[in-house]
Structure formats: structure tokens, C-alpha cells
Image (tube, rainbow, N blue to C red):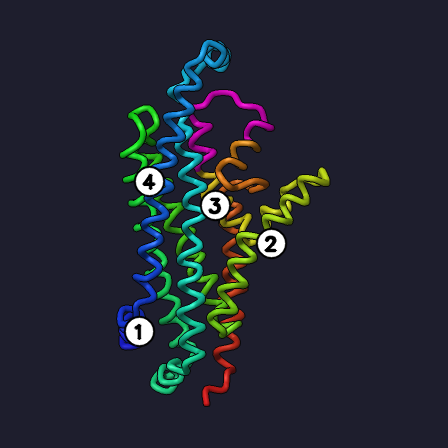
Amino acid sequence: MNDLVQAELRKITTTGLWWGLLIPTVLVALGGGLLSGGFGQLMIEFTTSAEAEQLSDVLGVTPDQWKFSLLGIGRTINIVTLFPLVFGAMAVANEIGTRTITTTFLTAQNRAQAMLAKLLVYALWGAIYGIATIAAVALGVVLTSGSSQMPGIGDWAMLALACVLASILMTMFGVGLGALLPNAAGVVVLLIMYFLVIENAVQFGLRLSGTPETVVGFLPNGSVNGLTGSVVVDLFMAKAGVVPEEGIDFLRIIAGAGGAQAWWLSGLIFFAWVAASFGGGWARMTQKDIT
């Protein structure tokens, strides 16, 4: 088993795909962090107006307790996790398409061990993407926000946990679909279209029709966005005072998690999607003709 894991690591590190996608991951995360910090500072300046101060007196909090930067951080993480998704899908689809996976299956004791090695290695790589993402976002926030908009140590720990978990799950979701649809270009186009266009169009249609958007929270994009988005909303609400339910829904939309469930439920829902994707890919690979 150890040899299979080492072989999978060599497959990844001897190609340029992992760092080719890690570079834009860091750049987009850094840019999102810069914008999040700047957005937080801008909102603080706005909320120091007389009307906002009167509202803050009613809520029992001061404007500097409204950490608007958290909402930008959540949206940034949701966008950046598309990169590990694409990485997982492309890596496996390319391996099947070029038939380099044949050698793996021929040298492994059985295909189940080979797939288990892939699961472990790609989960590790998803964690690497997640760590890089939260580090770049944190740097951006530090550079553009004041102390009032900086999340506390505990908040950063929760954000990091949600970010890394979302990144791992997105990588594994991509791996599963890459195994099910072993065409690198095709699976990437499908994933980008679904996560950026199709599901957002569904959400927009629900909003126009007056139908509750909570159904979106049970779909792949909505559930993974809810994992991070609901965390940042909970952290925001911990110090924001009394906010009506409509206001909480609006905060989730700003954080890129409109219609999402609680973070733990969103995580479980997306985990189910990942299990279905990876399980389907596993089943296909164990029966695939490798000649």
C-alpha cells in the first residue's frame, strides 16, 4: 500500500498540473482577501453614519463589531475551491485517457487498493490547496483591513477548517467525475458550466418565481458553498447583535451561499454527493477494461 501511495505522489509531482492550478488558486485567493478587507473597511466607514449608529444602539452593538470582511472571505473561498475541483477531475481523466492508469492496475495487488491510494493522495492534495487558499486570503485581509475587521484567532481556525474541508471534498468530487467521464476537456467544461452557470441559473429562477431557495442548499454547489458560507454567517452573527431572519438570508447571499442550510448539514449533504461521485468512479474503475 505504501508503494502505491508513493507512486500516486510521483504521478502528481512529476507533472505541472498541480502547480499550474495552485498558482491561480493563490492569486485569486489573495485578490479575494484584498477585496474582502477593503470591503469591510468601506462598510465600517458607512456604518459610522448617524443613522447606522442609532441602529447599532438599538441592536446593542457598535459598528466595529460588524465584521463584513467575513462575508467576502466566505465568497472568496467558494470561488477558489473550483481549482482543486478541476485539478482532481483533470488529473484522473488524463490518467485514464493516456492509459497511464493501466500500469497502476497491473502492478497493484487489486484495483481496490489502487483506488484507496488515490483517495488518500488526492485528499492530501486537496488539503494543500485548502491551506494555500486560507493563507492567501488571510494575507489579503491583513493588508487591506484594520483591526476591527480582522477575525479573531478562533474565527480564523473555523475558517481554515471549513476551507480545508471544502477543498478536500471538492477535489474528491472532481476525482470521482474524472473517473466517470474520462475526457479531461469535457469533464472540466461540464463542471465549470454546472458550478458557475447552471446551478446559479436555477437559483435565480427560483428567486424570480418566489419559490424558496432552500432547495439549492441540497444541490452540489449550494451545499459546498453552504459549508463555508454558513460558517462565516455564523461568525458574523456571533457579534452582530439581533438580525431578522430576512437579514440572515441576505448575509448568506452576500457570502455566496444563498439558500444554504446550516454549515454542518451542508457539509453532510455535499459529502453525500462526493460519496456518490467517488463511489461511482470507484465502481467504474474496478470493472474497466484496461487494455
The answer to which of marks 1 and 2 sits earlier in the sequence is: 1
Residue at 34% over, 85% down: 107
Query: Whole-percent x and y of residue 211?
Result: 71, 40
At label 1, which amino acid type do we have?
Lys
Q: Classify 252 as above or below 93.
A: above
* Mark 1 residue crowding within 10 angstroms, few (<14) / some (14–19) / many (20+): few
Q: CA distance from mark 3 to mark 2?
A: 20 Å
At label 3, which amino acid type do we have?
Leu
Residue at 28% over, 40% down: 139
* Mark 4 residue crowding within 10 angstroms, few (<14) / some (14–19) / many (20+): few
Query: Whole-percent x and y of residue 159?
Result: 37, 41
Q: Classify 152 as above or below 216.
A: above
Residue underneath mark 3: 227
Query: Whole-percent x and y of residue 251?
Result: 52, 32
Residue underneath mark 1: 11
Q: CA distance from mark 1 to mark 2?
A: 33 Å
From the viewer's perspective, tell me whether residue 241 is left or right of residue 200. Answer: left
* Mark 2 residue crowding within 10 angstroms, few (<14) / some (14–19) / many (20+): some
At label 2, which amino acid type do we have?
Ile
Q: Which mark is residue 198?
A: 2
